[in-house]
Image (cartoon, rainbow, N blue to C red):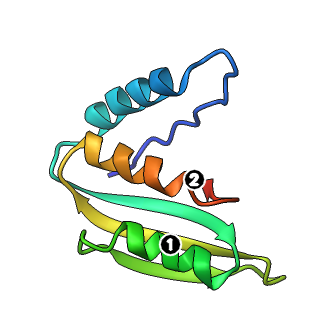
């Protein structure tokens, strides 16, 4: 099955609540829950950042894979889990957003 990926533009006029409301609608259209979901994050390559990511998903039975960038400045982490709902996915994104310098793909 080919998945359609939509890029959400950063609209300065759109509130965070509106962004997540639209994102939730998109998730519910694209997935039937429970559903496997893949998160991709890039963080500055400091052990504390990777540890924070792992701590956020600690109680989720998630699987992780990480890779350092060629210059060693960043760590790319893929997190796979069985998500129960769109709200659960959004909650994880909101928690990860608290990590300084994180990029969420």
What percent of the width, then of the height, locates residue 1?
Answer: 32, 52
Within the image, what quadrant is residue 99 found in? bottom right
Residue 18 got which mark? none
What percent of the width, then of the height, locates residue 102?
Answer: 64, 59
Residue visible at 70% across and 21% down?
A: 12
Secondary structure at badge 2 equals loop
Residue sitting at the far top:
13
Q: Nearer the viewer, residue 1 or 8?
A: 8
What percent of the width, then of the height, locates residue 34?
Answer: 15, 52
Query: Horizontally, is 14 left or right of 91 in the view?
Result: right
Question: Can you say whether 101 is above or below 28 in the image?
Answer: below
Within the image, what quadrant is residue 83 found in? bottom left
Within the image, what quadrant is residue 80 found in? bottom left
Q: Nearer the viewer, residue 26 or 62?
A: 62
Residue picked out by circle 2: 105
Residue picked out by circle 1: 52
Secondary structure at badge 1 equals helix
| Mark 1 nearby-residue class (10 Å; few <14, some 14–19, many ≥20) | some
- Between label 1 and label 2, give the one nearer the viewer: 1
Give me the C-alpha separation between circle 1 and circle 2. Answer: 17 Å
Comes first in the chain, label 1 or label 2: 1
Query: Horizontally, is 32 left or right of 46 in the view?
Result: left
Query: Horizontally, is 75 left or right of 28 in the view?
Result: right
Residue visible at 34% across and 32% down?
A: 24
Question: Can you say whether 30 is above or below 58 in the image?
Answer: above
Residue visible at 37% across and 31% down?
A: 26
Residue visible at 27% across and 48% down?
A: 88
Q: Nearer the viewer, residue 85 or 47?
A: 47
């Amino acid at each position: 099955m080919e998945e359609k990926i939509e890029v959400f533009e950063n609209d300065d006029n759109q509130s965070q609540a509106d962004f997540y409301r639209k994102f939730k609608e998109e998730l519910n259209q694209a997935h039937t829950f429970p559903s496997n979901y893949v998160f991709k994050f890039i963080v500055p390559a400091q052990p504390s950042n990777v540890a924070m990511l792992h701590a956020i998903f600690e109680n989720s039975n998630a699987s992780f894979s990480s890779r350092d960038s060629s210059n060693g400045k960043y760590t790319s982490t893929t997190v796979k889990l069985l998500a129960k709902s769109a709200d659960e996915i959004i909650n994880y994104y909101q928690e990860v957003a608290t990590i300084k310098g994180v990029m969420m793909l």
